[in-house]
Amino acid sequence: MTLEDKNQNDIVSSNTKNSLDIKYVFSDKPINRFKTKPKLEDKSTLLSKLKKEIENIENCELKNSSNKIVFSDGNDQSKVMIVGEGPGHKEDEIGKPFVGDAGMLLNKMLKAINVERNQVYITNVVNYRPPNNRKPEPTEVKRYSEFLRKHISIIDPKILILMGSTAMESLFGSNIKITKERGNWKDIIINNKTYLCIITFHPAYLLRQPENKKYSWIDLKKIRKKIDQLNLSL
Ligand code: URA
């Protein structure tokens, strides 16, 4: 092949070109750069990898004393993600979050703002039931918060709802108080991305302190308003 065959648009005459000692000739063909990009893994692959990673945790009292992993429930394509504290007895038995009494109240709370449970994505700070339903220890919360951050990045919600102080502390630290922070929209940066987040009371707390349901109702209405403002299709 002569040089001019390759450089179709070359303005240098072929005689000049062939008289020069040209070592390289560049093709004018467009380069398909997309071909070389790594294929993005889909959500369900990333979620199963994360679940495996959690299942492989070592030296964890929560895992060792529980029945099974409680990873998540709901729609992984949802734009609304709810984070609770950790599995209780029923969740540990069934393997799904929020299926006991607190879960029944959560379902009702969602219904009150016209949201069905299967339209949101639900998980917990810790994925194994703490022995005797104790609160997860700060070290456990810290350890599992790495998984939770990954989980949030994978789901990539437009609205993140943190239910209770454990969920709040796992992402914001323990220097803040839920009574002061609940009901305010906040930004949280996770893996270089900013998420819109709201802290609200945990349904189990509301079962113990029903007089505080009025505050949750205010928060729920704010969540409904935001879903509408952002035009989220659930
Ligand atoms: N409480 C939680 O925080 N999560 C559950 O899954 C159940 C009860």
Image: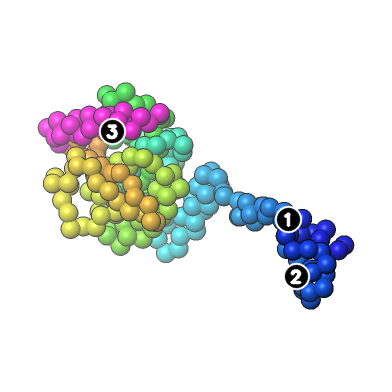
Q: Are marks 1 and 3 in contact (CB under 8 Å)?
A: no
Residue under numbered circle 3: 226
Number of marks drawn: 3
User: Mark 3 against mark 2, which lies toward the viewer?
Assistant: 2
Residue under numbered circle 2: 24
What element does badge 2 sit on? Answer: loop
Which amino acid type corresponds to the residue marked 2 in the rendered image?
A: Tyr
Callout 3 crowding tier (Cα within 10 Å): few <14, some 14–19, many ≥20: some
Q: Is residue 16 magenta?
A: no
Camera-nearest residue between 172 and 6: 6
Asked if residue 73 shows in the view, the reply is yes
| Label placed on residue 155 | none
Residue under numbered circle 1: 9
What element does badge 3 sit on? Answer: helix
Q: In the picture shown, does residue 140 fall above or below 68?
A: below
Q: Position of residue 159 (x, y in %)?
A: 33, 39
Which of the 4 image quarters holds residue 211?
A: top left
Callout 2 crowding tier (Cα within 10 Å): few <14, some 14–19, many ≥20: few
Which of the 4 image quarters holds residue 42?
A: top right
Asked if residue 55 shows in the view, the reply is no
Residue drawn 83% across and 67% down?
Answer: 15
Residue drawn 50% across and 47% down?
Answer: 47
Q: CA distance from mark 1 to mark 2?
A: 16 Å
Q: Is residue 211 magenta?
A: yes
Residue at the extreme bottom of the image, as rendered = 21
Q: CA distance from mark 3 to mark 2?
A: 59 Å
